[in-house]
Image (cartoon, rainbow, N blue to C red):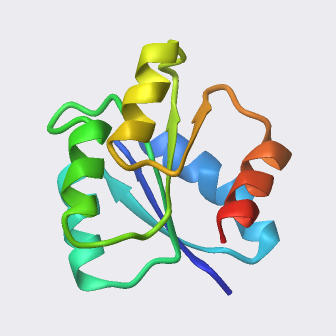
Amino acid sequence: MKKILLIDDEKRMLELLELYLKPYLYICRKALGANEGLKYIKEEKFDIILMDVMMPEMDGWEVCKKIREYSDVPIIMVTAREQKEDIVKGLKLGADDYITKPFDEEELVARIDALL
């Protein structure tokens, strides 16, 4: 089974993502916010990371940059920010894919599978 780190500042979104992914036999570790997510990345090995962009303590772009300093784990940005400039910025900072909220469960799983 593949291990996914979910990083978001909204507990409800973390629970929704886990609900979508469990039937596909993914093991989900939920991080409530950027700092908790970075802590888990240093302590555990993940196959892929799904994270929000808009978080209060540190945005997802900054988290992505920090992760890329020491890891090449696949990252998918899962965010409500849908402007072309935001998508390009995320990809240039090291994200492997970018999906906007609201998203389709099957599309999200297909994107995860493609990266894995």
Whether residue 83 sits left or right of residue 41 in the image: it is: right
Residue depicted at x 67% and y 26%: 102
- Outermost residue, right direction? 106
| Quarter placement of the N terminus | bottom right
Camera sees residue 33: no
Residue depicted at x 63% and y 81%: 2
Residue depicted at x 80% and y 44%: 107
Q: Position of residue 116 (x, y in %)?
A: 66, 72
Give the vertical position of 92 relative to 114 (above or below): above
Camera sees residue 103: yes
Nearer-the-camera pick, 84 or 104: 84
Nearer-the-camera pick, 10 or 95: 95
Q: Position of residue 62 (x, y in %)?
A: 21, 42
Give the vertical position of 108 relative to 103 (above or below): below
Give the vertical position of 61 relative to 42 (above or below): above
Residue depicted at x 52% and y 76%: 47
Q: Position of residue 75 (x, y in %)?
A: 47, 56
Give the vertical position of 82 relative to 1 (above or below): above
Q: Position of residue 109 (x, y in %)?
A: 76, 56
Nearer-the-camera pick, 22 or 34: 34
Q: Quadrant of residue 24?
A: bottom right
